[in-house]
Image: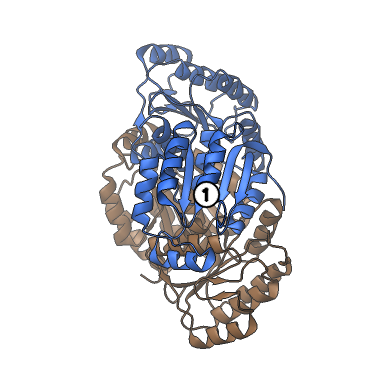
Chain colours: A blue, B brown
């Protein structure tokens, strides 16, 4: 079993196996961890004590929690309310069905309780509820790496039309908003680009997109007050795109103007470039739907 | 850009970029392809012509479709109805929101039409509707690799309690059924295993599970008439589990008694073992929720 690199995620886990599998998995991804606590039966200290500690821990930016049962509900609510104001807490409740809660009883002895009560407490405390392990760590990634958005208006930039459409659908389905570019941005981009580029939302740079075109369009969107979040789809399979697009994205992200999220689907080469981006603080996703699901959590934590 | 290996998936795609990104991605996974068709504006032949051809193509086992708009709805419905009886069709409709359909108009010129009409046609034709690209290829994997289940009763085997609980929750949330082991199976497994093993659903082999314990329990479940599908969670992070568990699983899967699905989360080593399993025809998933989502499609196609 390998260990992940250092980072801002702390994982509080009532299941040893979930914890060790995720830590091992994280080694291959660009998820960096600060603390990992497997607390099992919670006989002496419990999840609330650990969350309270992590709330004060300077190297913890995001808290992930896998919990089967909480012993002291009032304590949990009051601690999480306090901590979630300072840093995001993402939780999965194991045993949200009757059958699952029976399994929890024979696992950690936890009295799983009503799922609806848990979801209510999560909402009151400002805890982000993840539906599964994949979602938890995709959400942790965006919250660890990027910054607070001012609103929920997302601008899409793509070099693949189909990806732009799927991303648009995902944004609308997740109750987020499509940005409407300011007039100045539209005029300037139309002046630079040939007429086959669609300057709307999505901005479709089409199949002959270059690194310079990405740089121009991302930069203008970051400077447009009508845009809160930039989601750029970068497909390296198109012929004119060279790898210096990575440097351009990293430089633009380093300006820390707005959240900048990347979507790239591909094989070994794409994965290598994805690691470069993530190690430089740019959250990158394989599929549009997963990126948008993570952005929804970012917006819910900071804006809604 | 790399190319995936041969296999039974054929992908019919109205977007060139979606197609080439997915083909590139598939090279790193164990998804094997038979045909890939990027048909764009569909000026001469359309999606229905291609699906009709693939319906008769002996090397195509599963058809994946990314479609923005269908020109001839009646033709599409009648072709898909016929083909979907012989082999599964999994479809994503691009432009299911008003905003997404506007983007489709400037992409392929497709008139996207009402999403509800599409979903109705998909249902009538027996087409599996995928919510996104990740789901489409996770579903394609299970349908390409495994066999027809007799019913929807799933037996979970795990060496991590938390994973068993998350899987149980996912099965119930997806309206699938938990198997109830036959008395003979329970008696026999209790006789073999120590008392800390939980013989129920999940069967929890706990942290000191061995390859022999997996072999025994999977075999007995495959032979139990109360079980339709076996979902085994295999976490290689536990100390006593050796890699010969892979050979045992492959041998059991080769008997072709029932669908056998594996969940393994982990780093480089886990991914290597996952490739071994998949190349031998065992569909393997990183997370329980994703495996169960794929099983739901398998059951919906063959059973419901």
Look at 62% across and 27% down and name the residue there.
A246
Asked whether A247 or B155 is in front, the reply is B155
Where does the image place residue B222, in percent across and percent down from the top left?
55, 79
Is B219 left or right of B135, judged from the image as shown? right
Q: Which residue is tagged 1? A: A47
Look at 44% across and 50% down and name the residue there.
A131
Quarter of the image with the C terminus of chain B is bottom left
Quarter of the image with the N terminus of chain B is top right
Residue A30 in sight from this viewpoint = no
Where does the image place residue A262, in percent across and percent down from the top left?
53, 32
Q: Is residue B167 above or below residue A93?
A: below
Where does the image place residue A164, in percent across and percent down from the top left?
43, 34
Look at 44% across and 46% down and name the residue there.
A75
Asked whether B172 or B73 is in front, the reply is B172
Q: Is residue A286 above or below residue B229?
A: above
Parent chain of label 1: A
Circle 1 SS class:
helix
Q: Is residue A101 above or below residue B41?
A: below
Q: Tell me the crowding category of disc 1: few under 14, some 14 to 19, or many 20 or more residues within 10 angstroms, Cα based.
A: many
Residue at the front extreme, as displayed: A44
Asked whether A32 or A138 is in front, the reply is A32
Where does the image place residue B33, in percent across and percent down from the top left?
57, 55
Image-quadrant location for residue B271: bottom right
């Amino acid at each position: 079993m390998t260990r992940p690199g250092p980072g801002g995620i702390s994982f509080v886990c009532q299941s040893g196996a979930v914890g060790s599998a995720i830590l091992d998995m994280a080694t291959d991804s660009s998820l960096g961890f600060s603390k990992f606590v497997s607390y099992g039966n919670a006989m002496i200290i419990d999840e609330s004590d650990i969350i309270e500690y992590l709330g004060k821990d300077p190297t913890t930016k995001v808290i992930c929690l896998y919990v089967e049962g909480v012993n002291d509900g009032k304590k949990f609510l009051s601690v999480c309310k306090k901590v979630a104001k300072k840093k995001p807490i993402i939780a999965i409740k194991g045993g949200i069905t009757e059958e699952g809660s029976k399994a929890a009883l024979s696992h950690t002895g936890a009295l799983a309780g009503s799922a609806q009560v848990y979801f209510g407490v999560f909402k009151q405390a400002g805890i982000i509820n993840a539906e599964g392990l994949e979602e938890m760590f995709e959400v942790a990634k965006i919250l660890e790496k990027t910054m607070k958005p001012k609103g929920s208006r997302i601008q899409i930039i793509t070099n693949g039309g189909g990806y732009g459409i799927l991303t648009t659908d995902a944004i609308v389905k997740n109750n987020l908003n499509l940005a409407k570019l300011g007039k100045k941005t539209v005029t300037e981009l139309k002046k630079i680009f040939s007429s086959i580029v669609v300057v709307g939302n999505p901005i479709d740079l089409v199949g002959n997109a270059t690194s310079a075109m990405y740089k121009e369009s991302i930069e203008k969107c970051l400077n447009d007050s009508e845009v809160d979040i930039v989601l750029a789809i970068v497909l390296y399979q198109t012929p004119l795109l060279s790898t210096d697009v990575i440097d351009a994205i990293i430089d633009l992200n380093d300006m820390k103007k707005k959240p900048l999220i990347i979507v790239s689907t591909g094989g070994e080469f794409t994965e290598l470039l994805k690691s470069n981006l993530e190690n430089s603080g740019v959250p990158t996703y394989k599929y549009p739907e997963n990126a948008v699901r993570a952005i929804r959590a970012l917006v819910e934590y900071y804006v809604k």
